[in-house]
Amino acid sequence: MVSEASLAGALSNKRFELIILPTEKCNFRCTYCYEDFQIGKMSRSTIDGVKRLIEYRADEVEDLTLSWFGGEPLLAPDVIREIGGHAYAVCKDRGIQFHGAMTTNAYVLNSVLFDELMAMGHNSYQVTLDGDRDWHDRTRLLANQKGTFDVIWRNLISAQAHPDRFTITLRLHVHADNIESVRMLYRKLKEQFGNDSRFEMFFHKISNLSGDKGIPQTELGYNEYREALAYITDAKSVADEVNADVTLSDYICYAARPNSLLVRADGRIGKCTVALNDPRNDVGRLLGDGTLDLDQQQLQRWFQGYRDMHAQTLSCPLSTLPA
Amino acid sequence: MATQGIDPSSISLSSNGSILHGDPYASVIADSLGVTIRAGGANDLCTNQGTCKGTNIDCTNSGACGGSTNMGACKAPQRQ
């Protein structure tokens, strides 16, 4: 059962989150990616709409989060500068807590850009690595098929030189074929960043989400995954006391939270960052004047978990969304 | 813990993104948010709140779990 604290966080008007796709293009062609990169950079009308919407919400919220997603969001740095800078200024002016976060491949996140983003309150990043250079450069490729590990590593080290507090969370993809490579990477990361609390790591069990086009990657079963993590981290075992059912029961996905909206580059409003090509994810449009034209019934499909506080539906509404 | 369910059709959004609650229970809960806790959003990562023991399968939070990035709930793996 979900806690009232989590419920309050999801249902409150004091909090507002926009997950923004400033472009849906990407410089990477990860072999397992599910996106199709059909939609380009955000239009002027949508940029203006997002800025106005933030102004409207500023009358009510105490906590605003902008989470940049894509495509690769840093391929549209001007959009991030304009919207992110505006949000940061509005929040500073009104005494609202501001959180700027980004899921980026970090390929263009050089020190100049990092400094600029930090200066406007963007201090939380998620960067994915698929293993050490050998495996990463097989699966996280540029559109021209070149590897990306060395540039990302250089940018991470540049970020480390920044004096201020930030969080870079390194998401390490694990599957049956890259365990040895992730083990090498883990050691390298511990050596470089292990004493820097601004860098965090977490493992993610990966499977091929791109259908037939990617390199087949064998998804690990639950016990195999636990054993793999123990091996990678040199732990005797992954702790047994973590009860997945208990922990899962108090998580409400952003897609199920009424105070979280996805703004696509073309102005469409959605809920889920995974189901970008799913018509059930189209819940409305953001207009240039900052108002939302929403299909309430379509939107309410994402709130079904609240009916009986169903843990799975609240933690991933897509998993039980009716066709 | 949440003591009762909320009819999804009672939750709507106004044109400026404000949540309109038609269910009194939802209203009360929403208004009860006191301490601002950071939302996770697309960057939902190591989000353990409360008890955090050992190494979580997805999050590997083996250290202190009180930090700003460890708020909320813990995203657990699907059992196979």
Image: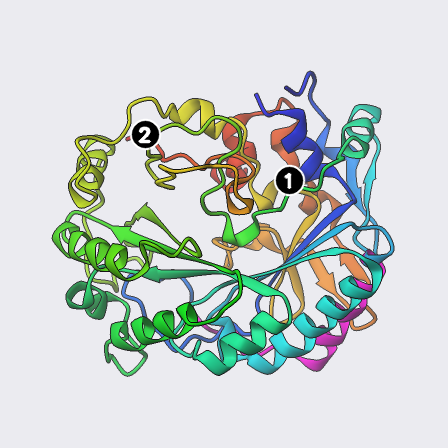
Image height check: is A285 above or below B70? below
- Residue at 67% over, 39% down: A10
Q: Nearer the viewer, residue A69 or A212?
A: A69
- Tell me: B2 left or right of A230: right
- What secondary structure is marked by label 2? loop
Q: Does A239 appear in magenta? A: no
Look at 58% across and 52% down and name the residue there: A281
In percent of width and height, residue A216 lies at 19, 56
Spot the residue most to the top.
B3
**Above or below — where is A246 with respect to A71?**
above
Residue B47: image x %, image y %?
49, 40
Residue A104: image x %, image y %?
45, 67
Residue A22 seen in this snapshot: no
Give the residue at mark 1: A301
> On residue A14, which mark appears?
none
Circle 2 chain: B
Q: Which residues are magenta?
A: A36-57
Q: Residue at x 17, y 63 (%)?
A: A135
Question: Magenta stretch containing residue A46, yes or no?
Answer: yes
From the image, state whether disc 1 or disc 2 is nearer to you.
Answer: 2
The chain under label 1 reads A
| Foreground residue among A110 and A259 | A110
Tell me the residue that label 2 is attached to: B79
Which image quarter is the N terminus of chain A in?
A: top right
The amino acid marked with disc number 2 is Arg
Q: Is residue B12 visible?
A: yes
Alpha carbon distance from label 1 to label 2 = 25 Å
Dividing the picture into quarters, in which one does residue A297 lie?
Answer: top right
